[in-house]
Image (tube, rainbow, N blue to C red):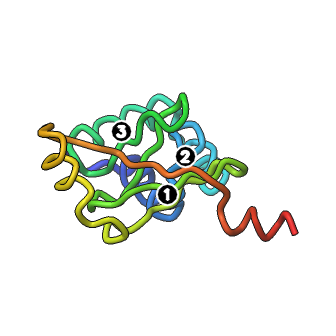
């Protein structure tokens, strides 16, 4: 993939906002942080999809209607807060053999997976008190 200043801004913003934003949310953050960047929403979508297709970032589908994006491509799971809708990474070592055990138990071949836990994050729990 050729270098692009716009792509660099998008990936840097994604890395700094590791709560797995949607393309729309990432666009809002870019416009707020760098109003002179001249990046449009179509450019954000196009670059996120291109990077996800190349495996540079991870596309997270099925959590909400809109896709979310993650700069962390290492094996991990996700936790989605039902109050603030932020998405957090969960280390795969919390359940290290879940894929292997599932394949052995069911005979299924698992090519890809997204494991998402749902609940209330510690920040929202603290705000309730």
What crowding class fits label 3: few (fewer than 14 Cα within 10 Å), some (14-19), or many (20 or more)?
Answer: some
| Picture quadrant where residue 1 is located | top left
| Residue 78 in the image, given as x and y percentages of width and height | 45, 55
| Picture quadrant where residue 65 is located | top right
Instruction: Tell me if label 2 and label 1 are in contact, CB under 8 Å.
Output: yes
Q: Residue at x 83, y 66 (%)?
A: 127
Q: Residue at x 40, y 52 (%)?
A: 70
Vertical arrangement, residue 69 with respect to residue 125, above or below: above
Q: Residue at x 55, y 46 (%)?
A: 26
The mark that comes first in sequence, 3 or 2, is: 2
Q: In the rendering, which numbered label is found on residue 76?
A: none
| Residue, disc 3 | 47
- Dot 3 falls on a residue whose secondary structure is helix
| Residue 103 in the image, given as x and y percentages of width and height | 16, 46
| Residue, disc 1 | 13
- Dot 2 falls on a residue whose secondary structure is helix
| Residue, disc 2 | 26
Q: Residue at x 27, y 57 (%)?
A: 98
How far apart in space, not on screen, are marks 3 and 1 (Cα)? 13 Å
- Dot 1 falls on a residue whose secondary structure is helix
Q: Where is the C terminus found, in terms of image quarters?
A: bottom right
């Amino acid at each position: 993939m050729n270098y692009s200043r716009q792509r660099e801004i998008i990936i840097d913003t994604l890395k700094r906002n590791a709560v797995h934003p949607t393309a729309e949310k990432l666009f809002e953050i870019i416009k707020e942080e760098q109003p002179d960047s001249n990046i449009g929403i179509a450019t954000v979508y196009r670059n996120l999809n291109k990077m996800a297709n190349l495996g540079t970032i991870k596309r997270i589908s099925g959590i909400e209607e809109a896709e979310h994006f993650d700069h962390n491509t290492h094996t991990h799971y996700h936790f989605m807060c039902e109050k603030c809708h932020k998405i957090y990474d969960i280390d795969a070592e919390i359940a290290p053999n879940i894929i292997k055990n599932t394949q052995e138990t069911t005979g299924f071949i698992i090519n890809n997976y997204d494991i998402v836990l749902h609940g209330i994050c510690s920040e929202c729990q603290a705000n309730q008190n």
